[in-house]
Image (spheres, rainbow, N blue to C red):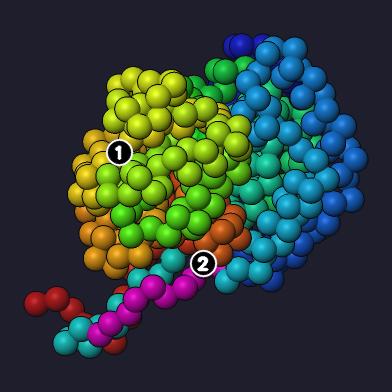
């Protein structure tokens, strides 16, 4: 059902929304055991049907290359046996997490004898709009299910065949566990009008929207959505090498932060080096990046020391390259790094490499990004690496969810007040 008459898209989406809302009710009270059984069955189906998933992915990759998709986006789109096993392992890991629904977050007694509890509850229906990454189908479906939410998945046209094959595995898991299949729905049309319909909230059936994709998609969602949004617009991540940094550690971390996977939101885009270690650290760091295949875009100060590099423009400091390119500047100590990051950061992830506890404490206290890292790669900015089993995305806003959006972040709460006859005077 990839092609739907435009006039029918709105009615199709409203039907999907109504079905999701209906599924959310029994899902919210489903037992932890039943949700766990569904997730284990989903993981098994993904492994069993890997050949079908790879064949579907091959179609998407062929289409992507025909449209001259960038290498970074093709990397996000590509599935192989290792990544498929990773999807299945991720679902199993989510299954093993503590079920958050019903957890008592806090409780207290009032002088009048009332006992008050703050208890985790599902959000309801979550809409996920994404591009290129077919693994989001598995991650989002599993995380939403674990938190007791129904989810509407709208993948991009570039990953449609892969995502549909993965979704079929999720549907099997729901059936096997006796849960409503409408709990995880995949939008069956590539018409962009479906996105617009989801942003309206589908007559109040969608409670939260999560976009996963390029800047233009996220910007559109944040601008047009009539329901709350968990998202980050860009991942302009910085690594600051302090004057106290161990050079070997810095070299290893900087190369990994930039080059492990250049197309992810946690990839470093700017390297800041303390002026105190220009003579000892700068050239070895640049050489290590160059040897790894990274293009350097250098500030005027860096160019005076290492001429011949490509000059950085003002635009470079606020650019998410998602490629093997990094901008490099010299700063005066941790204060200079903080000033640069606070000016150009997208508030995603920043790292400091330092052996000075005072510098680290100041960096952590004075930078207002969702994730701050000490002596480790920015590429750990990931829900799976945080022990969350997976993530539906990274949020940089300050309301409700911030940083990796995992199972707990996909819940809200309600208050339960227990009395024994109290009335208010």
Q: Seen in the image, is 359 located left or right of residue 400?
A: left
Q: Is residue 38 magenta?
A: no
Task: Reply above or below: 3 against 390.
Answer: above
Q: Is residue 410 visible?
A: no
Could you tell me how far apart the alpha carbons at marks 1 and 2 are, in whole angstroms?
48 Å
Q: Which mark is residue 233?
A: none
State which quarter of the image contains the C terminus. Answer: bottom left
Q: Seen in the image, is 225 located left or right of residue 129?
A: left
| Residue at 44% over, 66% down | 120
Foreground pick, 317 / 298:
298
The residue singled out by tag 1 in the image is: 330
Element carrying mark 1:
strand
| Mark 2 burial class by Cα count in 10 Å: few <14, some 14-19, many 20+ | many
Q: Which mark is residue 101?
A: 2
Percent position (x, y) of residue 61?
77, 24
| Residue at 50% over, 35% down | 211
State which quarter of the image contains the N terminus. Answer: top right
Foreground pick, 274 / 113:
274
Foreground pick, 211 / 347:
347
Element carrying mark 2:
loop
| Residue at 24% over, 65% down | 358
Which segment did they paint magenta?
Answer: 99-109
Q: Within the image, what quadrant is residue 117 found in?
A: bottom left
Q: Which mark is first along the chain, 2 or 1?
A: 2
| Residue at 24% over, 36% down | 343
| Mark 1 burial class by Cα count in 10 Å: few <14, some 14-19, many 20+ | many
Percent position (x, y) of residue 192?
57, 18
Q: Seen in the image, is 167 located left or right of residue 31?
A: right
Task: Reply above or below: 367 against 52.
Answer: below
Q: Look at discs 1 and 2 and give the one toward the viewer.
A: 1
Percent position (x, y) of residue 188?
70, 27
Q: Residue furthest left?
A: 425
């Amino acid at each position: 059902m990839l092609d739907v008459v435009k006039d029918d898209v709105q009615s199709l989406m409203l039907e999907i929304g109504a079905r999701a809302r209906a599924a959310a009710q029994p899902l919210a009270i489903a037992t932890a055991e039943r949700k766990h059984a569904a997730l284990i069955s989903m993981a098994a189906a993904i492994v069993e049907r890997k050949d079908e998933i790879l064949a579907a992915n091959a179609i998407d990759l062929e289409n992507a290359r025909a449209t001259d998709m960038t290498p970074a986006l093709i990397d996000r789109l590509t599935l192989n046996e290792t990544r498929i096993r990773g999807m299945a392992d991720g679902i199993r890991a989510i299954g093993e997490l503590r079920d958050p629904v019903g957890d008592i977050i806090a409780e207290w007694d009032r002088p009048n004898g009332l006992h008050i509890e703050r208890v985790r509850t599902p959000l309801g229906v979550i809409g996920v709009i994404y591009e290129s990454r077919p693994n989001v189908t598995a991650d989002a479906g599993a995380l939403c299910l674990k938190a007791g939410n129904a989810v509407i998945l709208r993948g991009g046209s570039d990953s449609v065949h892969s995502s549909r094959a993965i979704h079929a595995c999720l549907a099997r898991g729901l059936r096997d566990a006796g849960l409503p299949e409408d709990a995880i729905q995949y939008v069956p049309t590539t018409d962009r009008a479906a996105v617009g319909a989801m942003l309206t909230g589908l007559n109040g059936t969608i409670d939260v929207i999560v976009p996963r994709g390029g800047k233009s998609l996220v910007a559109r969602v944040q601008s047009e959505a009539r329901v709350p949004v968990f998202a980050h617009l860009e991942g302009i991540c910085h690594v600051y090498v302090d004057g106290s940094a161990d050079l070997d550690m810095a070299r290893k971390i900087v190369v990994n932060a930039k080059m492990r996977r250049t197309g992810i939101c946690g990839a470093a885009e700017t390297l800041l080096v303390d002026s105190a270690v220009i003579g000892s650290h700068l050239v070895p760091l640049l050489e290590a990046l160059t040897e790894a295949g990274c293009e350097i875009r250098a500030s005027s100060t860096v160019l005076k020391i290492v001429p011949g590099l490509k000059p950085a423009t003002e635009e470079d400091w606020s650019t998410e390259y998602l490629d093997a390119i990094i901008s490099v500047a010299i700063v005066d100590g941790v204060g200079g790094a903080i000033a640069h990051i606070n000016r150009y950061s997208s508030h995603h992830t920043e790292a400091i490499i330092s052996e000075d506890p005072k510098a680290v404490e100041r960096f952590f206290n004075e930078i207002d990004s969702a994730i701050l890292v000490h002596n480790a790669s920015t590429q750990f900015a990931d829900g799976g690496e945080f022990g969350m089993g997976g993530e539906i995305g990274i949020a940089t806003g300050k309301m409700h969810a911030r940083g990796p959006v995992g199972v707990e972040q996909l819940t809200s709460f309600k208050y339960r007040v227990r009395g024994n006859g109290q009335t208010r005077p």
